[in-house]
Image (cartoon, rainbow, N blue to C red):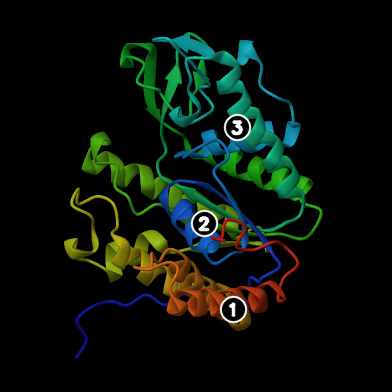
């Protein structure tokens, strides 16, 4: 007797290996998966412009990365004693111009270098609702709590989404020096502030358009993350207290589905061992100077050394001494 509709991810012909670089951009799923990859000591870079939600914002970020042109004072606006970029999340805002620019350009330059050797790109879209800053006639990535009267809210057209996705793919292919695999997904987080019906319109438009694009590119795939949470895990016990964001149990479930479909078995074993090591590194012994603690640390260093021999990039860079 079956009590739920379990969704299985088809096993990918291409598999993530321990040596691969993984770039992720967009909404929550990209960040959640990137966090696990990072703890598993794979080379990953996530959201250099901060969390982005819609296709135009992600395309704008990729275009700026492709151009490799640093931001200047004229690219920012000044509001309520802070300098901010309408292409970025508010985490880059600062009351000092040079600090805001330093954060923005440091992330930009790091990403240009990282993307050249990237093998995998994970893109997660959250919405097709956008805000246009009327003064500049510009679709923004984030409103930075500027009053809504300065923006016009609208739904992206099918044509606009197709154009943003297609141009984003062209940019990524041009930057990367190796063949890349691009995985698209839709964030399962419902944008309830837009309205329940409006959220469904938004995500339906994204899902339909992504499938149109993916069908025309052999190096692109669609990950049914949205469908797993909506149809497989159809229960509020898999959500946080806000009843909107997936909780750690749901994220772990999605990770297990994803990892078995897309990660090479040896690499998955490498990641799992590193996750265990990271948990051990976070352990705070009752007596740091005891013989038991010294033996524990020595064995831990042996495990780290064995793991380091499996890859060329530096792992556990912030380990305790």
Q: Nearer the viewer, residue 85 or 158?
A: 85
Q: Is residue 187 visible?
A: yes
Q: In the rendered view, tell whether residue 126 sits above or below residue 178.
A: above
Q: Which residue is mark 2?
A: 34
Expressed as whole percent of the image width and height from the top left, the position of residue 313 reads 72, 62
Q: Quadrant of residue 217?
A: bottom right
Q: Secondary structure at mark 3?
A: helix
Callout 3: few (<14), some (14-19), or many (20+) C-alpha neighbours within 10 Å? many
Q: Nearer the viewer, residue 48 or 287?
A: 287
Q: CA distance from mark 2 to mark 3?
A: 21 Å
Q: Nearer the viewer, residue 104 or 115?
A: 104
Q: Quadrant of residue 195?
A: top left
Q: How many marks?
A: 3
Q: Which residue is found at the position 18% from the left and 64% from the top? A: 237
Q: Is residue 140 left or right of residue 114?
A: left
Q: Which residue is found at the position 66% from the left and 75% from the top? A: 305
Q: Nearer the viewer, residue 113 or 303?
A: 303
Q: Which residue is mark 1?
A: 303
Q: Furthest residue to the right?
A: 177
Q: Is residue 10 visible?
A: no
Q: Which residue is found at the position 55% from the left and 73% from the top? A: 271
The mark lying in front, picked from 2 and 1, is 1
Expressed as whole percent of the image width and height from the top left, the position of residue 54 reads 47, 38
Q: Which residue is mark 3?
A: 60
Quadrant placement of the N terminus: bottom left
Whether the residues at callouts 2 and 3 have beta carbons within 8 Å, the answer is: no
Q: In the rendered view, tell whether residue 78 sits above or below residue 24.
A: above
């Amino acid at each position: 007797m079956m009590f739920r509709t379990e969704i299985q991810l088809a096993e990918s012909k291409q598999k993530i290996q321990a040596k691969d670089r993984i770039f992720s951009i967009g909404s929550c799923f990209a960040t959640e998966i990137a966090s696990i990859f990072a703890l598993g000591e794979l080379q990953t870079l996530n959201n250099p412009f901060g969390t982005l939600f819609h296709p135009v914002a992600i395309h704008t970020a990729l275009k700026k990365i492709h151009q490799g042109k640093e931001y200047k004072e004229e690219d920012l606006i000044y509001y309520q004693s802070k300098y901010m970029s309408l292409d970025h999340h508010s985490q880059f805002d600062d009351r000092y111009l040079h600090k805001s620019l330093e954060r923005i350009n440091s992330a930009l330059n790091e990403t240009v270098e990282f993307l050249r050797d990237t093998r995998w790109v994970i893109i997660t879209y959250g919405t097709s609702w956008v805000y246009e800053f009327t003064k500049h006639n510009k679709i923004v990535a984030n409103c930075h709590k500027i009053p809504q009267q300065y923006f016009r809210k609208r739904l992206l057209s099918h044509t606009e989404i197709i154009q943003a996705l297609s141009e984003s793919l062209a940019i990524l292919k041009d930057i990367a020096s190796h063949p890349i695999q691009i995985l698209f997904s839709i964030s399962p987080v419902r944008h309830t502030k837009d309205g329940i019906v409006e959220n469904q319109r938004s995500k339906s438009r994204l899902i339909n358009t992504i499938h149109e694009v993916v069908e025309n590119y052999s190096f692109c795939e669609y990950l049914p993350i949205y469908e797993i949470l909506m149809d497989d895990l159809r229960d509020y016990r898999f959500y946080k207290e806000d009843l909107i964001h997936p909780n750690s149990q749901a994220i772990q479930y999605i990770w297990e589905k994803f990892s078995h479909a897309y990660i090479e078995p040896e690499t998955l074993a490498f990641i799992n061992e590193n996750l265990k090591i990271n948990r051990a590194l976070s352990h705070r012994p009752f007596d740091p100077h005891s013989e038991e603690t010294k033996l524990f640390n020595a064995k831990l260093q042996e495990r780290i050394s064995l793991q380091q021999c499996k890859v060329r990039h530096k792992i556990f860079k912030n380990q305790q001494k």
